[in-house]
Amino acid sequence: MKKLIVPGTPVTAMEMFEFKGSSGPNVVITGAVHGNEQTGVHAARLLIKKLEEAEILGHIKVIPVVNTTAYYHRQRVSPFDNIDMNRIFPGKEAGSLTLRTAYTLWQETQDAEYIIDLHCCGTMGSTYTLADYEGSSEIKDLCIALGMPVVCQTGGTEGQFYLDSSRKRGQKAVIIELPGGQPGGVIDMEWAGFCADALFNCLKYIKAVKGEYVEPAKTVFCGKITRTTAEKEGLFEPVAKAGDFLNEGDVIGRLTCDGEVIICTARERVRLVSVSPAKYIFVGENLFGIMPVL
């Protein structure tokens, strides 16, 4: 393990675990670009244990915690500048702490062929891979090899580590969104274990680790996520749960406003990405997120 020192901030560093072979691809796996998304951190650390016992073919770098100050404060962004790191890549060498950290990671990962960035979609979310698979058949193949239940086409927000790596540097880069994280850095232990196993299996597929690749269950490809927010204040009661596949007319939830019951239904075949728990909801708050099944 070595520490990546952020320029101008000698007390801030990222721990990087490096595994070197002589013949396979360069791979980078990162976690906690958002500090409270800790299911990904745990998945990365479980993967490190597997790699310590494996025969390495390629060059693998695992950085479980990128945004260290946000991580230790159990929050999404660093308390020193409140900047969302996953909106400002490639960062700046002479900027605030978050900009410098992003710059350090960007420089360290220039030679990577594959980048897998681990995130969390909240305790009420469900697992998926986020990727620009429509723009690259190689990225689509990587998504299939990872074996997450579904793959979502990116919405294209610039400044994200995986997206800028893909579009500006031609790297095969994706995000895996895992349940947990918000609020307070909750870890979904089951999905962390599943993700670590899937990553290790995928590393066999791309010949970064020696071993027999096991073909995962079929992945469902979906379009971009759309989110529905409350237009009225009231009591929201979910009917469906995150991860469900719904058909047109299936009930997602009910919002009761001044005695009026508003039924939220699917308008096509979709996967429910996230859904609010039962609570009194206010105007503008998220009710649910869906992605159309292609």
Image (cartoon, helix red, strand yellow):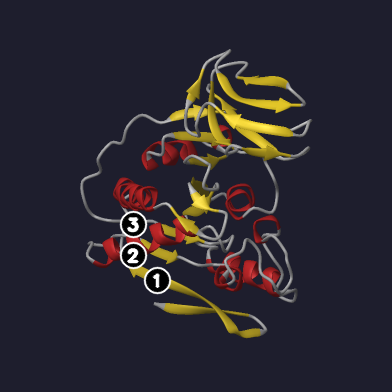
Q: Tell me residue 13's x, y (percent).
A: 54, 78
Q: CA distance from mark 1 to mark 3?
A: 17 Å
Q: Is residue 145 left or right of residue 93?
A: left
Q: What element does badge 3 sit on?
A: loop
Looking at the image, do the residues carrying marks 2 and 1 touch, with CB atoms under 8 Å apart?
yes
Which mark is first along the chain, 3 or 1?
A: 1
Quarter of the figure that contains the N terminus: bottom left
Q: Is 192 rendered above or below residue 110?
A: above
Closer to the camera in the image, 192 or 31: 192
Q: What element does badge 2 sit on?
A: helix
Residue at numbered disc 3: 24
Please name which of the two marks, 3 or 2, marks the residue nearer to the observer: 2
Q: Tell me residue 244's x, y (percent).
A: 47, 28
Residue at numbered disc 2: 48
Residue ID at (44%, 39%): 143
Residue ID at (61%, 69%): 70
At label 2, counting other C-alpha atoms closer than 10 Å, the crowd grade (few under 14, some 14-19, many 20 or more) is: many
Looking at the image, do the residues carrying marks 1 and 3 touch, with CB atoms under 8 Å apart?
no
Q: Is 126 rendered above or below residue 68?
A: above
- Residue type at mark 2 is Ile
Please name which of the two marks, 1 or 3, marks the residue nearer to the observer: 1
- Residue type at mark 1 is Phe
At label 1, counting other C-alpha atoms closer than 10 Å, the crowd grade (few under 14, some 14-19, many 20 or more) is: some
Label tally: 3
Closer to the camera in the image, 261 or 248: 261
Q: Tell me residue 133's x, y (percent).
A: 54, 36
Residue ID at (70%, 69%): 99
Residue at numbered disc 1: 17
Looking at the image, do the residues carrying marks 3 and 2 touch, with CB atoms under 8 Å apart?
no
Q: CA distance from mark 2 to mark 1?
A: 7 Å
Closer to the camera in the image, 222 or 290: 290
Which mark is first along the chain, 1 or 2?
A: 1
